[in-house]
Image (spheres, rainbow, N blue to C red):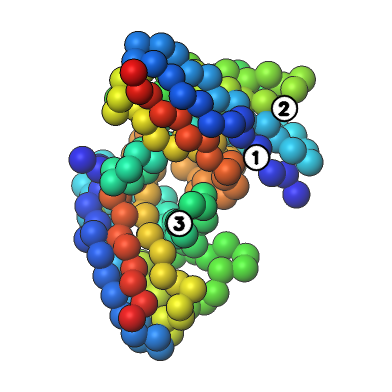
């Protein structure tokens, strides 16, 4: 049973970048899609973008275009999400989650990574 | 501001039924039968309870059911149990994006 294991808590300064990783433990990403979803306090869930690791093709939500980059390292069974030009409003818990296809449910989630942006 | 509209809270007593709504547009909920519902307990990752409007993943009790009419999807939890107290989020495929609702906090009285 594949588990998604994310990297640890981050504290960043405004204007900097953060990179969060998501590793498939106990298996591989196979042909799955990996999405990134963030949860800000009181704002619910927000989809940021997705990648098909086997193809390395990513696409992003309009709200994050130009600020987010999602990459995959197939040999390491790891997907990473980098968010740049951080501001205080980016303080959130960031989740990776697996789908079979773009329209499929997010059926396996990482444990979440807290990113705090503060001066 | 979330793309899908959910009431912020709902409540019910053990054994009762409660229904949550999730309103979108013809570009998301109304345009695709790819609505999912997620349950989230405090400090935990969300868990899918319903997908493709009304399908239940293996292991999800049949007390959870979903439906859709036009641009509004609904989740019904029957026979409320204490462990159902959680936040519930709807989600819909929207052509190239995935959109979420703001969530409904369910309190079991």
Residue linked to disc 2: A77
Circle 1 residues within 10 Å: few <14, some 14–19, many ≥20: many
Give the residue at x 41% y 11%. A16
| Comparing labels 3 and 2, the label whose residue is closer to the camera | 3
**In-image side of A25 versus B3 (left or right):** right
Give the residue at x 46% y 24%. A11
Residue B33 in sight from this viewpoint: no
Q: Position of residue A23 (x, y in %)?
A: 68, 31
| Image quadrant where residue B69 sits | bottom left
Residue linked to disc 3: B42
Are dots 2 and 1 on a single chain?
Answer: yes
Are dots 1 and 3 on a single chain?
Answer: no
Residue B56 in sight from this viewpoint: yes
Residue linked to disc 1: A4
**In-image side of B3 versus A5 (left or right):** left
Q: Position of residue B7 (x, y in %)?
A: 22, 60
Circle 2 marks a residue in which chain? A
Q: Secondary structure at mark 3?
A: loop
Residue B14 position (above or below residue B55): below
Give the residue at x 40% y 86%. B14
Ranked by sequence position, the earlier of labels 2 and 1 is: 1
């Amino acid at each position: 049973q594949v588990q998604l294991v994310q990297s640890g808590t981050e504290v960043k300064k405004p204007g900097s970048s953060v990179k969060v990783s998501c590793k498939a433990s106990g298996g591989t990403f196979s042909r799955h899609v990996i999405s990134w979803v963030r949860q800000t306090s009181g704002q619910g869930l927000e989809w940021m973008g997705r990648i098909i690791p086997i193809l390395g093709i990513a696409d992003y939500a309009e709200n994050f275009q130009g600020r987010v980059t999602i990459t995959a390292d197939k040999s390491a069974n790891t997907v990473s999400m980098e968010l740049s030009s951080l501001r205080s409003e980016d303080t959130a818990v960031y989740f990776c989650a697996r789908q079979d296809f773009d329209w499929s449910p997010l059926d396996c989630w990482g444990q979440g990574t807290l990113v705090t942006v503060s001066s | 501001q979330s793309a899908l509209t959910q009431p912020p809270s709902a409540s019910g007593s053990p054994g009762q039924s409660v229904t949550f709504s999730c309103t979108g547009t013809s570009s998301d909920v109304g345009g695709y039968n790819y609505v999912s519902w997620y349950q989230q307990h405090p400090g935990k990752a969300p868990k899918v309870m319903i997908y493709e409007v009304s399908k239940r993943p293996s292991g999800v009790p049949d007390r959870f059911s979903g439906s859709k009419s036009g641009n509004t999807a609904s989740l019904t939890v029957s026979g409320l149990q204490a462990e159902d107290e959680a936040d519930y989020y709807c989600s819909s495929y929207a052509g190239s994006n995935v959109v979420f609702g703001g969530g409904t906090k369910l309190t079991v009285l």
